[in-house]
Image (tube, coloured by chain):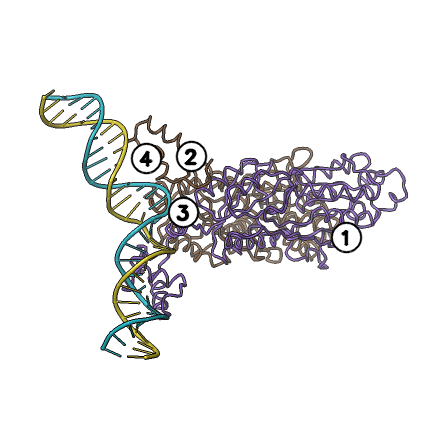
Chain colours: A purple, B brown, C yellow, D cyan
Amino acid sequence: MSRETVNLRKLAEALGLSQTTVSRALNGFPEVSEVTRARVIEAARRLNYRPSASAASLATGKARAIGHVVTFGDHMMVNPHFTDFLAGAGEVYARFGYEMLLRLAPAGGEEDVYRDMISRGRVDGVVVHGPLTDDPRIPFLRSLGIPFVVHGRCGEDPAGYSWIDVNNRRAFMRACDFLMDLGHRRIALINGIERMNFADRRRQGYEAALMARGIRPDPAIMFSEDMVEPYGYRAAMEVLTGRDPPSALLVSSVLPAIGVMRAVAELGLRAPADVSILVFDDCLSFLQPGSAATPRGIPFFTAMRSSIRLAGRRIAELLIEQIGTPGGEPKHELWEAELVVGHTTGPLPVTEAVGSVSGQSLKSRR
Amino acid sequence: MSRETVNLRKLAEALGLSQTTVSRALNGFPEVSEVTRARVIEAARRLNYRPSASAASLATGKARAIGHVVTFGDHMMVNPHFTDFLAGAGEVYARFGYEMLLRLAPAGGEEDVYRDMISRGRVDGVVVHGPLTDDPRIPFLRSLGIPFVVHGRCGEDPAGYSWIDVNNRRAFMRACDFLMDLGHRRIALINGIERMNFADRRRQGYEAALMARGIRPDPAIMFSEDMVEPYGYRAAMEVLTGRDPPSALLVSSVLPAIGVMRAVAELGLRAPADVSILVFDDCLSFLQPGSAATPRGIPFFTAMRSSIRLAGRRIAELLIEQIGTPGGEPKHELWEAELVVGHTTGPLPVTEAVGSVSGQSLKSRR
DNA sequence: AATAATCTCCAAAGCGCTTTGAAAAGGTGA
DNA sequence: TCACCTTTTCAAAGCGCTTTGGAGATTATT
């Protein structure tokens, strides 16, 4: 097998055909006879012909690539939820022959990176990750006129662009209701960064649920940070050893929830006997293959669940579709998270339900 | 600001210069006067000129992009350790103006994907992730003659290609010695998939350390799987509730170690009082910002530590350097992991050290 | 002043593909 | 047989950049 690359010209020469015919044969155009097409395809395979991506891109104006700009979090960290999104999207890209381009950007600096990728013609469309409530990227991308799909939504006018989002508000309302139905009244919120729209909506749901039962949200037990393990640990530690500790924790991701469990264990408490824990579960595959996380096949955490990987897949599909049909209307999908009951929630402990100085029961255990 | 893209021709026309001069001015060639260069740069900025990536790539033969092929794990999962690698590499790529291309491939199918990316000219170099002990990708890439750097090593001839690796063998030897110095004799190994060279070397180190003290490795307490949380849980559960349970666990990543902790807690055990746990810590940023994972600023896990993010950074640097100097020799770096003492290791519990039916003490606690 | 050397700048030829407009080849009906 | 389609193939013109081989203009050398 020859090492030097064979290009269209050489292939055409070898076949005794023109470049036009060869190109058309390979790209499935109808104006070439099937027998010729078969000959061409066979020769292409045999000579190991691969069309140059940049030449094709230059000629067609299409890059056959999709851009992702991932934002460094507060800890200069790439959000680990991203691997699962990537797994979903990457699968679709592979199927449709699209390339995936990745760039890092500091928070707030995404625009420049998008602009560069786009106006240099490296990508045909982009995905927007982690939209803020009032995100400048949306009007910016709209002004560029490039196809894009947002993973999540912004605050206003969610009709003017394509997005896929979980109904975060309702998810957290239901989660909160579920805990209150079990008797819990004091529920801590360990949320993501509330500049991000998803976290903002989650807080809204949490607050609305509380208020609906006449409970005033207490900022002392509400947190908002990057969703990492140590954050969960710290927040749980603070709130469980503080005065008037909550009987339940609502946690925005499994990652901090693991930290919460570490704190709980360290304090000699147990879930759900001493404290209930309900998490939002993105079905991160490295934490949860299927739902059989405990011996009995019952998931460990009680959770609001929605697969981020599926979201990645769907968003990729939508974007490719949008690239294919330029004039199309924006599309939206709002997904409901499912409430899956696991091992970490239970009724309010009796000692507290009685109404004695709440929290004493917790502290005395240590 | 005009919406239609301005290309080199328009920019040259606007300036009353030839395309040659404009191109040279922008690319820093010496044969253009500084005053002209300044004029050109200013106009380029003002007209918002961005050279087309595909045109440049076609003309130069350089893609200014680097390819990464990530393998789906056994759970069709993208290794979460990858986010941190990505954070490190992406930073370097951004600095040098390189694009990062990502593709997914099923285990064993990476070659085709590499071949496609490379021979279509999409990338100037590639990174090999998770090399097997006898990985066909290395001879394959070598035969293609494209620059590549391996994150890790293969079994044989590590001189013929560039790589950066942790001294996994020594790391696990030291870890094992550390545990044995504390009195532990029965140490379980919760390893990664041993087809992968890093995991293979880790097992070698573990076995060598045991043998050096006359202990025969016991396959009953040695595991080898994808390093995810539930795996750690399952393995720990099995081994701690089985007969003759180990007094210490050596775990190949913090992810399964979290599962181990979950099992330990569920069994009513405590670390290090009942069981010691030592993990290999890749400094995943979502689990560990700095080392202050506990209130006292002492890391939670006792660990062999080496930053995967730093590895990503260094590998990117090496690869870019290699792309720049075609004829160069392969480069290697072997990094030593540091042993950091945390809260999860301690001396062998007395009850066991006495020599009573080992493991009874553990089981009776449940 | 004439020649050589240096600076600046340019026209034009690719890079490898797609695509337009047209021509040759083959098949039909009169 | 010829005129008229339809099918199949082709030559050539881009796409937007880099780069080669010169050509003017300017300055230095004899």
Give the quadrant of the N terminus of chain A: bottom left
First-in-chain label (3 vs 4): 4
Instruction: Please tell me which of labels 1 and 3 falls first in the chain.
Output: 3
Marks 3 and 2 sit apart, C-alpha to C-alpha, by 33 Å
Dot 3: element: strand
Q: Residues within 10 Å of mark 2 (few under 14, many from 20)?
A: some
Residue indicated by mark 4: B24
Q: Earlier in the sequence, mark 3 or mark 2?
A: 2
The answer to whether marks 1 and 3 sit on the same chain is: yes
Task: Give the mark nearer the N terminus: 2 vs 4.
Answer: 4
Quarter where residue A249 is shown: top right
Nearer the observer: mark 2 or 4; the answer is 2
Tell me the CA gap for discs 1 and 4: 76 Å
Is residue B16 visible in the rendered structure shown here? yes
Check chain identity for marks 3 and 2: say if they share one.
Answer: yes
Q: Mark 4 belongs to which amino acid?
A: Arg
Disc 2 target residue: B47
Camera sees residue B189? no
Q: Is disc 4 placed on a helix, strand or loop? A: helix
Quarter of the view holding residue A3: bottom left
Q: From what the image shows, is residue B349 above or below residue B111?
A: above
Q: Which residue is mark 3?
A: B125
Residue A45 image label: none
